[in-house]
Image (cartoon, helix red, strand yellow):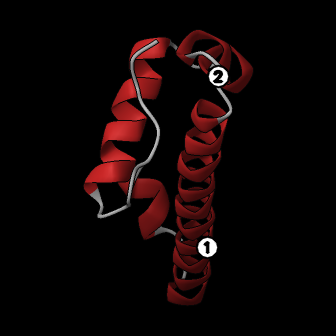
Amino acid sequence: MLGRMANKDADAIREELRRIGQQLAQADELRERRGKVVDEARAAELTQREIALLLGMTEEGLRKAQKSYHGRGRSYGGRLAS
């Protein structure tokens, strides 16, 4: 991998880094949106299992994701237990 990157010119590397940065920002926005919609789903009494299935996640993965989401200073009105 490092050898391949060394063969690229600096402008190509800069452009690749910009694209990666944009994709990471989009991923952050999606995680933020997921956290908000999961809270809304829990408030609407969807189960943890149903939400996890709809998102293609395990229940444990969803719990960890929501814990991280709320750990970033979000207010939380729902519940995480199923």
The residue located at (65%, 46%) in the rendering is 37
Q: Residue furthest right?
A: 54
Image spot of residue 29 (x, y percent): 59, 63
Q: Are discs 1 and 2 less than 8 Å apart at CB? A: no
Local packing at callout 1 (Cα closer than 10 Å; few below 14, some 14-19, many 20+) is few
Instruction: Give the residue at the far bottom of this rendering.
Output: 11
Q: Identity of the amino acid at label 1?
A: Gln
Position of 18 compared to 56: left or right?
Answer: left
* Label 2 element class: helix
The disc label shown at residue 51, or none: 2
Q: Relative to residue 24, is residue 70 depicted above or below?
A: above
Q: Measuring from the top left, give residue 23's x and y in whole percent.
A: 62, 64
* Pointer 2 local density, CA inside 10 Å: few below 14, some 14–19, many at least 20: some
Q: Nearer the viewer, mark 1 or mark 2?
A: 2
Q: Secondary structure at mark 1?
A: helix
Count up the numbered dots: 2
Residue 63 x, y percent position in the rendering: 39, 26
Residue 82 higher or lower than 41, as above or below:
above
In the rendered view, tell whether residue 42 sits above or below residue 61: below
Query: Residue flagged by tag 2: what amino acid is it?
Result: Ile
Of pointers 1 and 2, the one earlier in the residue sequence: 1
- Give the x, y percent position of residue 80: 41, 26
Q: Residue at x 42, y 30 (%)?
A: 79
The numbered dot on residue 80 is none
Give the Cα distance between marks 1 and 2: 27 Å
Please give the name of the residue rendered at 50% of the width and 68% of the height, measured from the top-left corner.
Answer: 7
The one of 6 and 22 positioned closer to us in this rendering: 22
Numbered badge on residue 22: 1
